[in-house]
Image: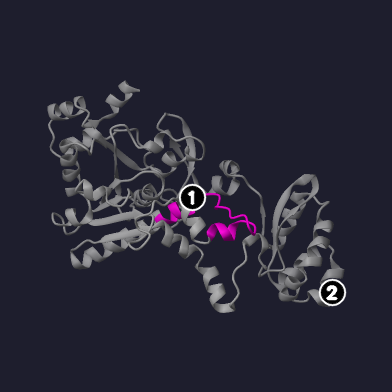
Amino acid sequence: MSGQPSELPLAGIRVVEFTHMVMGPTCGLVLADLGAEVIKVEPVGGDSTRRLLGSGAGFFPIFNRNKKSIAIDLQSPEGIGIAHRLIATADVVSENFKAGAMKKLGLDYDSLKRFNERLVYVSHKGFLPGPYAHRTALDEVVQMMGGLAYMTGRPGDPLRAGTSVNDIMGGMFGAIGAMAALMQRERTGRGMEVQSALFENNVFLVAQHMMQYAVTGKPASPMPSRISAWGIYDVFTVAGGEQVFLAVVSDTQWALFCDAFGLDDLKNDPRLATNNLRVTAREWLMPILRERLGAMDVRDISATFEQKGLPFAPIARPHDLFDDPHLKQTGGLAPMQLPDGRSTTVPLLPLALDGARPGVRHGPPRLGEHTRGLLAELGYAADEIDELCRNRRVADEAAQATSD
């Protein structure tokens, strides 16, 4: 895999984002990685996700690379004036605050489009307009009400997915909508409002199970108790307690699997001749396979599956991926500096453009890192900027460092 593309497709597009947490910042991340200039508008005290602990500690560094930071007090007339000047230079505005929050500030789409009909405005919310729109939504909320937690957990034990799937995908759909709106603007000269929502995203994720019911008339069972479409499609515990996921999803693969592991009796059993027969035989077939594979070394099993072209996977933990040989060799992990100065590597967008991966041009910004430069670009004189900083209407990197 070669390095970064020589010219990124969204170069020359300016995005101003009023976002926090995951959903809105993900939209900006996608646009920024693809070349847009993304300016993150933060409160003078900074985006609260800069200070999260536990499972939120990774939010800011992963979703805010390749962005600039300007810190503005949007509760002041001066701050709103800066925001208006900044938005006047933007192609896209993105926000993910509670319904009505941007309208109170006069920064909603209806207010802004009167001054800039070419503006593309992306709103990320919990729900699209409708009966639920007033509710406060979180990824876990919509996973529970949208069928995903039911499908992930055991019967009677709904379980959220192990990552922020709706927040991340909702932000991705916001970015897709923004790019579609920019394309249409090239034809019409007018922008539009794009809306993306957690709940509707979750419904899209479980749509295959909705359609399963539409086709079969039978409700989908939770994943741990589902009737699998494949005869062998499971995690196996083998020698030393190691675990590996193994799949045999066709009759050709079944023959290869049986030959590779000396399972002639199973290969020749007419009750196992087809995948559908093996699905119905899982109750007695799986214990036999678990017993025969259970004493084998996970490396030997994996090597055999790889040699035969059979699907398999080690059971990795997220931090194991920093040392994944495929990611390291293909450039899927890029070096990046954290706001506190430490270095790490970070996963890139899962795509390549002409064989090149859009990479990290700038680590996640320090709070107010670009405040002075952007204000100067907007026409503020140096003494005006100093006065704004003294009155805490804006914060720049130097002021933040002093307060820290």
Image position, residue 81 (x, y; %): 15, 41
- Residue 373: % across, % down: 22, 35
Q: Residue at 37% across / 39% down in the picture?
A: 362
Give the residue at mark 1. 164
Q: Residue at left 22%, top 28%?
A: 392
Residue at point 30%, 40% (across, down)? 68
Q: Horizontal and vertical percent for residue 240?
A: 79, 44
- Closer to the camera in the image, 378 or 284: 284
Please, which residue is most extreme toward the right here?
A: 265
Q: Quadrant of residue 71?
A: top left
Decide if residue 275 is on the left or right side of residue 317.
Answer: right
Q: Where does residue 128 sit, x and y in percent of width and height? A: 35, 61
What amino acid is at disc 2?
A: Asn
What number is the disc on residue 268? 2
- 159 in magenta: yes
Residue range in magenta is 148-170
- In which quadrant is the C terminus drawn? top left
- Compare residues 42 and 259 and report the one nearer the observer: 42
Give the mark, 2 or 1, whose residue is nearer the N terminus: 1
Magenta highlight on residue 343: no
Give how far apart the Cα atoms at labels 2 and 1 are: 45 Å
